[in-house]
Image (cartoon, grey):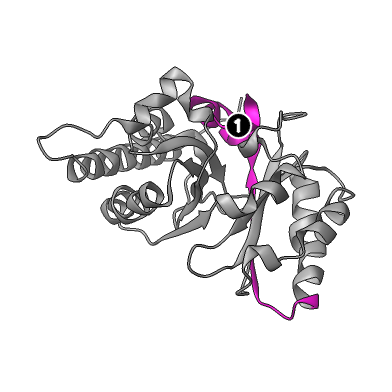
Amino acid sequence: MKHQTKSQTETGISRRKVIVGAVAAATAANLAPGGKLAMAGAAIDHGENHMTPRAFVYTELQISTPFENVPWQELNGQIANEPGFLNKTWFSGVGNNSVGGIYSFDSVETAQRYCTTFFPAVARNLGVAQTTRVFDASVVEDASRDIGSPQFGSGPTQPPGAFVYTEVQLNVPFQNAPWRDRNPVLKQQKGLISKLWLSGLHTNTLGGVDAFDTVENARAFAVADFPKTAATLNAAFYTRVFDASATEAASRGLKSPYYT
């Protein structure tokens, strides 16, 4: 068992209290008219979260918090009650302990609502910058199914050890994206378990969430392989590597399709 000094322990407790307080404040600000939380997300308890998603949301907070200090039980209870919410996979940044995730929503409108109300309120109350992205799920279904995306019903072959988030600074309507050429190449990528393709709402950026068996294989893809692909497109790009093992329990708590 790793030994923690008193100051380290107190810092962890302090961060946890701050995050819990921020969520409470965001929840209060996000009350529906009449003072009751919108309960569309309660469908998660009845299996209805398995419906086909119509939008995905990526989030990341500019914060450094070991995931063991994140009060995900409290957060999960609030996130699950957000209108249109279907499921979430938590992300914990490798090397920087950022906190975020990839979510499924039942519509673009509910995804936009989450990105303009609840999540910014959490970031504001924490006093940190944040990133949100909304993606159109309907246009990427065939491409994602072809490469085993659990968001569209493919049963996971094994629990992931890591995730890689990618986004390329291009404006390419997904019907014109070369995913039929790209998927066979990705299927040969060492350690790749599945891929969720992403197409930016209003921007048509290309990207994805790639599940890997280990952090090492995920890092190799993000650092050594993906930059070569971006170079062939002559495009700037964005990559993040996340430790899936740190967030498994939290992700299971929000019905992450990677663990069902």
Task: Determine which residue is flagged by label 1.
Answer: 257
Q: Was residue 254 drawn as part of the magenta stretch in this picture?
A: yes
Where residue 164 sits in the image (x, y, percent)? 67, 51
Percent across and percent down for residue 146 are 77, 44
Task: Tell me which corner region of the image, top left, top right, bottom left or bottom right, holds residue 148.
Answer: top right
The quadrant of the picture occupied by the N terminus is top right
Q: Classify 136 as above or below 149.
A: below
In percent of the image, x 64 and y 71: which residue is there? Answer: 172
User: From the image, which quarter does the C terminus lie in?
Assistant: top right
Q: Residue lying furthest bottom in this view?
A: 234
Q: Position of residue 190 (x, y in %)?
A: 87, 47
- On screen, residue 190 versus residue 90, left or right, reads right
Toward the viewer: 248 or 167? 167
Q: Amino acid at mark 1?
A: Pro
Task: Kindly identify the residue that appears in the image at 18 percent across and 46 percent down.
Answer: 29
Q: Nearer the viewer, residue 171 or 101?
A: 171
Is residue 106 something one can see in this rendering?
yes
Residue found 25% across the figure and 34% down from its top: 38
From the viewer's perspective, is 61 left or right of 35? right
**Which residues fall within the magenta stretch?**
232-260
Task: Choose top left, top right, bottom left or bottom right for residue 226.
Answer: bottom right
Residue beneath the point at 71% across and 42% down: 145
Dot 1: element: helix
Inspect the magenta stretch and tell me whether residue 9 lies in it.
no
